[in-house]
Every structure is written in structure tokens, then in C-alpha cells.
Image: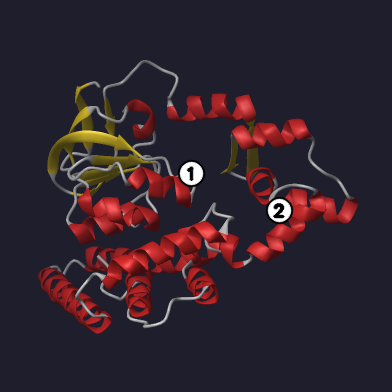
Amino acid sequence: MPTDMDILVREEYELRKLAREEKSVSDDILHAHAKNYSSKYILVYDEDKIFASLRKKIEGFKKNDETPEAFWARVQKEKRDTQEKQSLVLEQLRKEEEIVDLIKFIREQGFLRFEYKEWFMGAEYKFLELFKEIAKRIGLDIETFFLSYGIDDVRRFFTHGEKLSQADIEARKKMYILLQDGNERVFRVGAEAEKFFGEIFDTQGTVSTEVRGVVANRGKVVGRARIILPRDFVQIEEELEHFKEGEVLITTMTQPTLIVVMKKAGAIITDQGGMTSHAAVISREFGVPCIVGTYKATQIFKTGDLLEVDADKGIVRIIKRI
């Protein structure tokens, strides 16, 4: 677990401070806040929806008796306690230099990955005005632009005036896959991408009742599955309303907008990710059993399935189908 004050803690602290303001919080203040924590607002191009969500959170913190300063002090203490426990473990392992280095590396990456996300995911919102202008010049709405155009396509438009055909746009909006295979870059779209995905991840074979993945946090749980596919910020917030305490959260990969349900989850299962993924780091912080990198949990299970999660062995089984 990271022991530094990560970006999620810093954002909550800032929102708690805004909740203590006597005057109403303006759109300009919310805009500046969202830009500072923009990785939470990917796939949202309507700022009114972002502002409404932030105001809802601020109102929630107004009802909380804990002051921003008390919140910060509490989290600092939790981090210090964790650091002390880690120091004891590292002391016991001091002769195992490779293991100690690996532990320190994972801890550091668990912290830094949140910082990196601000740029490789948050850039979409940080530079939204620029992207809107590019989309306007191409003649597309901003959502269609993001779902279809890559950097090479944008370059060809500005250098040669070339645009994607409507057929290409629709195919890419349905599905596209880009991966590096040695020195070769493989790009597939539409039905071809779906077929390729099915072959790689074996989603077109026989119906399975279990998946296996990487253990990110140990534990055993039995609970009902709840599939949440992170499409956009607004859709996720709507799905969060239906999540029940102790359900097994199953998603492609978690993101900061899912923090609320991750605290309530009996276990967390993801298709993607490794030991330093968002799901792995947060599951260890909250003490929730977690298995990542299953590749196809979101396709094998359905919301309502009764599952047995064995996060000691990295196996999830269906006890009873819905």
C-alpha cells in the first residue's frame, strides 16, 4: 500500500474545504477543481453534469461533522500506522534484498499511477476546449470524435484534409483494438475487432462457470455479482445507486469514480490490471478481497449470480446462476 497522501485523498480534502465555504461555490471554482482532478471526469463532455455531481458531494460533506483539518490528520495517522507496519515487515525481510526492492517498487508505483492518470486519462478534460475545436473543424460532435479519431487521423486531416468515412466512424464506435505485437502495430475495427478479441481472450468458446486471475488482496467471500461497465462518468453515478453492501463488484477495470462502491463491495474482480492497478491498490487500502487480470469476468458473470470468490487462490466460481 502507498503511504503518501495520494491524489484521491487530496481531492476529498479540497471538496471538504469547499463544503465549509459560507457562500455558494461558483462554476469557475468547480471548473478549476475538476481540471486539477480531471482523471475522474473522462468521457464527460457536459460540464453541467460534472458541476452537479461535485455540488452533490459538497452537500454531503456539509452534513459531515469531521472538519477538513480533522480528516487530513486522521488520514495522516492511518498512513503513519501503515508505514510503521511496513517497516516491521521490511525489517524482517532485510536480508532478502530483491523482495525488499520489489515491495518498495510496488508501493511507489501504487502511488505514482494515480499521478500519471491525471495526464494519460485526465488530458481529455484538461484540454477539452482544444479537442472541441478540432472536432468542430472536422465536422463531428466531441463524443464521436473521441470514439473514432486517433492522433494519426487528426494529423492526416490537418496536413491533407482527409477525413474518416462514415462507415469507418461507425465501425470504430462499435469497437476497435490497437496493440503492439513485436515491431508490428495491429489495428482492428468493428466486426473484425470483435472476432479478434474473442480469439485472444477466448470469449467465444464454451460457457464457463469460473475465472482465474491475479490475487491482489487475499480473502474469501460469497456474494451476488454486480457488473458495472465504466462507460462514462454520468452512467457510472447512476449505476452506483443500485449497488448493495457486500455485493461482488465486477468491472473491466476500476477508476476513481467507483471508490464509493469499492468501499461497500464484498470483493472486487476486474478483467484487466495487475498488482499496481487501481483496483489492487484500493482493495488493499480498504481490506477488500480482490482478483485482477481475469480477462473475461464481465462476460462470464451476470448481475445477480451468486459467486464464491477465493482470493487466496485467485478463483471466482458461480454457485448459482441468476
Residue under the image location 20 percent in, 76 percent down: 66
Q: Give the residue type at disc 2.
A: Ile
Amino acid type at circle 1 is Arg
Camera-nearest residue between 158 and 312: 158
In the picture, residue 245 is in which quadrant?
Answer: top left
Q: Residue furthest right?
A: 160
Residue 67 percent coordinates (x, y): 23, 80
Q: Is residue 165 above or below residue 16?
A: above
Query: Looking at the image, is mark 2 or mark 1 earlier in the sequence?
Result: 2
How many other residues sit within 10 Å of disc 1, few (<14), some (14-19) or many (≥20)?
Answer: few
Q: Tell me if residue 277 can be seen.
A: no
The residue at 17%/35% (across/down) is 223
Q: Secondary structure at mark 2?
A: helix
Q: Nearer the viewer, residue 260 or 206?
A: 260
Q: Which mark is residue 312?
A: none
Q: Residue furthest top?
A: 206
The numbered mark at residue 151 is 2
In the rendered view, tell whether residue 88 sits above or below residue 314: below
